[in-house]
Amino acid sequence: MLKRDYGDDATQTTCATGEIDNIRHLARVWAARILDRMGRPARHSRLETDVLIELGLLEDKYSRQQAHEVLDDRERVRALRRELEAIDWEARGHFARNLQFMVSRFRLSEPDCAVLAFLAICSRFEWLRTLVEDAACCSHLGSPAECAAAATGVSIEAVWHALRGEGRLCRCGFLEYQFRASVDPIDLPNLENDIRLGIWQPDFGEGFLERRCMRSSAIGADQELQPDQLSESFRYILELVRAMLDGRAAAGQILVHGKPGTGKTQFALQLAEYLSATRFEVLESRRGHHLNAAERLHCFLGAQELLRERERCLLVFDESDQVLAGSSGFMSSRSHDWDKAWLNAIVEGAPVPGIWIANDIEGVHAATLRRFTMIAEMPELPEPVRVDILRDKVKDLPIGEEWIQQVARAQSVTPALMEQAARVGRALGGAPREAIEAAMTQTLEGHCRAAGESFEPSRAPNGASVELPYSVEWLNTRPEIASIVDAVACTIDPAGRLLLHGPPGTGKTRLARALAERADRPLRVVCASDLLDRYVGATEKNIHTVFESAARHKQVILLDEVDSLLADRSNAVRTWEVSQVNELLARIDGFEGLLLAATNRPEMIDDAVLRRFDVKVCFDYMKPAQAMQMLKALIGKHDEINRELRDTLAGLDRLTPGDFRTAVRRLRITGTAATPETLVNAIVEEVAGKPDNHRPIGFTAAVG
């Protein structure tokens, strides 16, 4: 036998020679029926002669004209058909057994079975496939469906019904995506590759089909699900899935989305374990080949059918972004509407409860989103929860509690990154604690920066971290800030908008921390780098995300260096510069919590922005009395401050709390003991290094 009889993958099949001869006879019968029905082909058409040689109508390679002459002899073609049909044919062997298995397992109708067999045999014998394509192109049959009807005896209506997107063959994932996307009626439908090859194999069955589309998860969750720690929407998901598994609610699909590494997949694993459900995952790769979106959707369809009759199963479709978005991975512009309708039908009609996990759903069509029973965004974890998770991840490592607390402050550090850092720490074995902490810090910082996220490395307790005494009494503000802080502390749900403006180092950011602490709320510092994006529209999306998250977690927002975000729109050159300010203004208006904005250049801010703030707090340089109070707090009561140092400190122009912090840090770095003399000298040097473009304030009065 020639290899062309089997197609390119013939060597991978294991059917015995007798079975091949039996199936070959059926293929010849079908070919004769198609030749009989197609009539005389058009004179200008180009027909392949392989099928004529196979059927004995030609003995060798002839010219195209002679092939037409053979087909013009209609009586000879009809006689060949009658001769082949007169020979008894019996369904036997691996192919027949596997076909019957698919009919019973997937509840296929007789037309479904006939079309499935026709496509499988066409893929097996290249000469038959070529005949179908020629007949569809060059005869009145006009389509592969007409050829299938002519060959199998099934009505053309039943064939088209079997091939449609809502049919069982498509719903079970047996047909390749390209056929569903095609608008060309002469394209021969293809079986999905694993089905096309596997249907000839002796081991084709339940296990084979399961391996091609899903895997069961034998890996347990790192932690048990704690329902009392779930947000409200995820508690609803828990109860909804429980009702689906118990049969009290119809099966549906749930979409969980959010930033990478926030624990979406872990939640699905924990949920299945908590509800005593068997968890299956749609394959992402098969035999080393990464599956594209269309192939993964085939896997989802097959898994749904295989799990339909099983009890308490949960199917997880992880990394579903590309499938949902209909991106270039498998949806072309000419077939987008068809694809959308097909995808919607898949989501809406899935018989097994499922959780779809995606990072970004912005590109998903609203019609598709409506098909999900419930959609929830995985929230960013509050700091206390991040501390607990990180502490659990590194419990077997010699890690200090201070390092854990410092790292957990960074919202960009997700549970997935924590686990990655913990692996690095374990790999270092018996290294000193400082080395392990440094390596883990570098791991976290590298991942965060690569993802465009901000991350401050933890501060080691070696003196590099400077936390100074603090009091709002040391801030020179108009109006007085102490009363505002007290008012915030007395409010159950503090709300308001404060604009903090003044020279650098005057305590604006530190005041924001103090207000958040007095309000007993976490502080979220937002810089321009956290919001601005190179892509049009992405900045607005980031703004939306920040405010939504802050409202959900009841955070105090500090917009640091806000002049870079809310610049005067009259100076805008591009439309997106205006739209960014508009988006931020809208979010500021709608935010019901405590919002602070800090800037050194209030004159750069849009006038409409200034009107949004309830109180504009002006920060000025420290008064002599305030500077002396802060100095005393730094050196303690045991050190005496002489008259000369008092006069020196009082005579300093443009003195800020930030100068004290820098001076203390300088002394620690140089290893100099902090005495009144060394500290005042360091402050003098710091003030002297400031630029001269300032207005004189004139702290000249001596402190008594």
Image (spheres, rainbow, N blue to C red):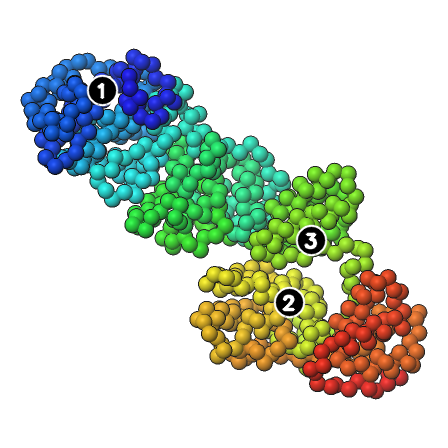
Tell me: 283 left or right of 439. left
- Total numbered circles: 3
Tag 3 secondary structure: helix
Identify the disc placed on residue 407.
3
Label 2: how many residues lie within 10 Å, few (<14), some (14-19) or many (20+)?
Answer: few
Tell me which numbered mark, 3 or 2, is placed earlier along the sequence. Answer: 3
Residue 266 figure quarter: top right
How far from the left and from the top, in percent, is residue 288?
48, 33
Tell me which numbered mark, 2 or 1, is placed earlier along the sequence. Answer: 1
Circle 1 sits on which residue? 26
Q: Name the residue: 41% across, 20% down.
A: 203
Report the amino acid beneath label 3.
Val
Report the amino acid beneath label 2.
Ile
Q: CA distance from mark 1 to mark 3?
A: 70 Å
Circle 2 sits on which residue? 492
How far from the left and from the top, in percent, is residue 206?
41, 25
Q: Is residue 91 above or below residue 253?
A: above
Tell me which numbered mark, 1 or 3, is placed earlier along the sequence. Answer: 1
Closer-to-camera residue (56/202): 56
Tell me: 228 left or right of 183. right
- Of tags 3 and 2, the one toward the viewer is 3
Closer-to-camera residue (313/579): 579
Cβ atoms under marks 3 and 2 closer than 8 Å:
no
